[in-house]
Amino acid sequence: MKKVIFFIFCVAIFITACEDEFTEQQRIGVQPIEEFFASEENADKALVGLYDTMQETYIGLWDLGQGAFLTRQIFGDDMNKGGGDAADQSQYFDLHNFNIDPNNLYTTGMWRAMYKSVNFANFVINEMEKTDFANKEEVIAEAKFIKAWNLFELTKMYGDIPLKSEFTTTIEGFSIAKSSQAEVYAQIEQDLMDAIPNMADKSNLEQAFRFSKGAAQALMGKVLVYQGRHAEALPFLQDVINNPAHDLEPNVADVWNGTREYGQESLVEVGAVSSIGYAWGGREADWAGGQESNLYIQLMGPREGEFNLGNTGIIEGWGFNLPSRKLIDAFEAGGDNARKSASILTTAELQAAGGSVGSPYDYEGAIRVKYAPRADNSNPAATTQLNYGNNFHLMRYAEVLFLAAEAYIELGQDGNARTELNKIRTRAGATPIAATVSGQALFDTMVDDKFLELSQEGQRYWDLVRWGIESPELVARGKEPRHNLMPIPREEIEKNDQINQEDQNPGY
C-alpha cells in the first residue's frame, strides 16, 4: 500500500483463530481502546491497520503459514511447486500433490490470517458505529468490504465455517459453531450491500491503495456467480464495466511490470514497498513477520544457479511456482503472443535471448514472466532479494469481464458474452471469437481463455471445482472429490469448543 506500517494498531494485539497468544489483550501504547477512537485521524489509522492485515494475509512470510497468494494457487494445473527439490518447503509439495493434512502450515495459516482480518474488521466497524465522525460511513464501508472479502475466501476454500460477526479477544469469544455456506453468503451479501453506497468511486479515492465502490460491486458479482445467481450478478458486474474509471490496461505487460500499480485494471491489490532496505542479518532475516516488501517475488524467481537469464532483464530467485507443461502448451497453441510474452518465457525464447537452462527441479519448459524478479523492482542500495516492491493483484478488471461473460452464457446471451471475451482477446493479441461460436463451445472457449489470462493468480483451481471440471493432470497428482474443500485446521477443532471432529470436512 506504498507506505510503511509497522503496527496493526496502537491499542491492542489480538485476532487470530483461537491462538492463546493472540487472545490476550496486550497494550503496546498507553491509549485504551475507548480513547483511541476519540479522533477522526485515529479512525483513519485503524482503517490503514486493517488494510495491513490484507498485506499480511497474502504476502506474509511462508514460515509463519502466511502468503495466501501462493497457497491459493498451489493446487492448480497451471503451476508446478518447484524450488530446490521436493523437500524444499515440503508442505507446499504436500498440498500440490493433494496430501492435505489438517495440520498443514499453509492451509492453517490462511485460516488464521483471514480470521484475523475478519476480527479486526469487526473491531473497526463496532467502534466506528459509536462515533459521529465525518468519515464514519466510509470507514465502516471499507471495513465491511474487507470482512466480506475474507469471508468469501474462507467459505470458497473451507465450505461451512464459523461466522464470526463480533470482535473478540477471548478464547470463549472465538468458540463459534460452523454456519452453513448459505448463511455465510448471506452475511457477505449484506456486508457488501451496506458497503457499496458508501465507498468512493475509483476516480475519487483519497489514497490509491484503498478499495473502491467498483471493487465491492465486482466482489458482489463474483459471489453471486459462484452461487449460480447469474441474472442477479450482472447488474453489479455491468456497473463496473460501464464505469470509465475501470478498464483493461492497453498493454497487458504493464499489469505486471510495476508501471501501473493501482491502475485502471486494478480492483483489489495488496501493496509492497522496496524503500525500507532490508538486509540479511537484521530483524527481517529471522522471519519474524511484518515485512513491507514482497519476498514472494524472490521465492518465485528462476532457481539460482540453474539459469543463465541472458538479456531478459529477469534475475534469479528460489525457483518456486513454475509454469506447468499444460499451461505452456496452452499458450503455444493459443496464438495470443502479447499475453504469452507477458506471462511465460519458454526455453527456446530464453535461448534466443542469450540464456540457457540447467536441470532445475519441476521445470517443464518455461519460466514465469508474470511477477518475475527484476532489479528495477527492488532497492539498488539494499539486498535485492529482500526488497521487491511488487504489488499483488487479487482481483482485476479482466476477471470482471470473464464473470460477466460466464453469466451471459448461462443466461443464453451469447452475443454479449462474446463482446466481453473479445475485449480480453483483442488485448491479448488473439483472434476474436467468431459469431458462430455459442453455447457449450463458447463456455469452453471462456474456460480456456481464463486459464491463460489469469494463470498463476490463484483462480484456476477454484474455478475447476465450482464448474465440476476434472483436470486429468490434477487427478494424476492425487486429487479426489474431498479435495474440493480444504480441511478445517486441527488447531481450530482443538481450541474451538463449538467444533469437533464430526464437524471436519468429509474425508479429513
Image (tube, rainbow, N blue to C red):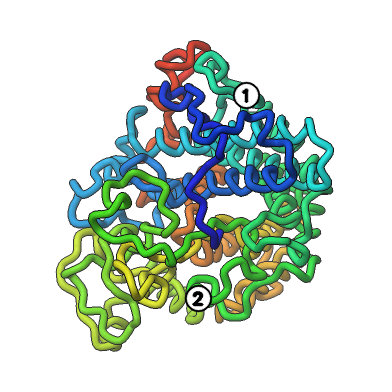
Estimate the x, y position of residue 73 in percent, counting from the top left.
43, 51
Out of 189 and 58, give the one closest to the viewer. Answer: 58
Amino acid beneath label 1: Ser
Q: How many marks?
A: 2
| Figure check: 306 above or below 393 | below
Write the residue at 43% across / 66% down. Answer: 274
Mark 2, Cα crowd under 10 Å, few <14 / some 14-19 / many 20+, is many
Q: In the picture, residue 398 is in which quadrant?
A: bottom right
Circle 2 residue? 339
Circle 1 residue? 180
Q: Is 216 left, or right, of 7 in this rendering?
A: right
Q: Is 353 left, or right, of 495 in this rendering?
A: left
Mark 1, Cα crowd under 10 Å, few <14 / some 14-19 / many 20+, is some
Estimate the x, y position of residue 285 in percent, counting from the top left.
27, 52
Write the residue at 40% across / 16% down. Answer: 494
Q: CA distance from mark 1 to mark 2?
A: 40 Å
Look at the image and tell me whether residue 89 can be seen.
Answer: yes
Q: Quadrant of the N terminus?
A: bottom right
| Figure check: 344 above or below 326 | below
Estimate the x, y position of residue 305 in percent, counting from the top left.
16, 69
| Figure check: 451 above or below 177 | below
Mark sitting on residue 131 = none
Amino acid beneath label 2: Arg
Out of 359 and 5, give the one closest to the viewer. Answer: 5
| Figure check: 18 above or below 307 | above
Out of 196 and 378, give the one closest to the viewer. Answer: 378
Q: Quadrant of the C terminus?
A: top left
Is label 1 in a helix, a strand or a loop? loop
Look at the image and tell me whether residue 416 can be seen.
Answer: no
- N-term-proximal mark, 1 vs 2: 1
Is label 2 in a helix, a strand or a loop? helix
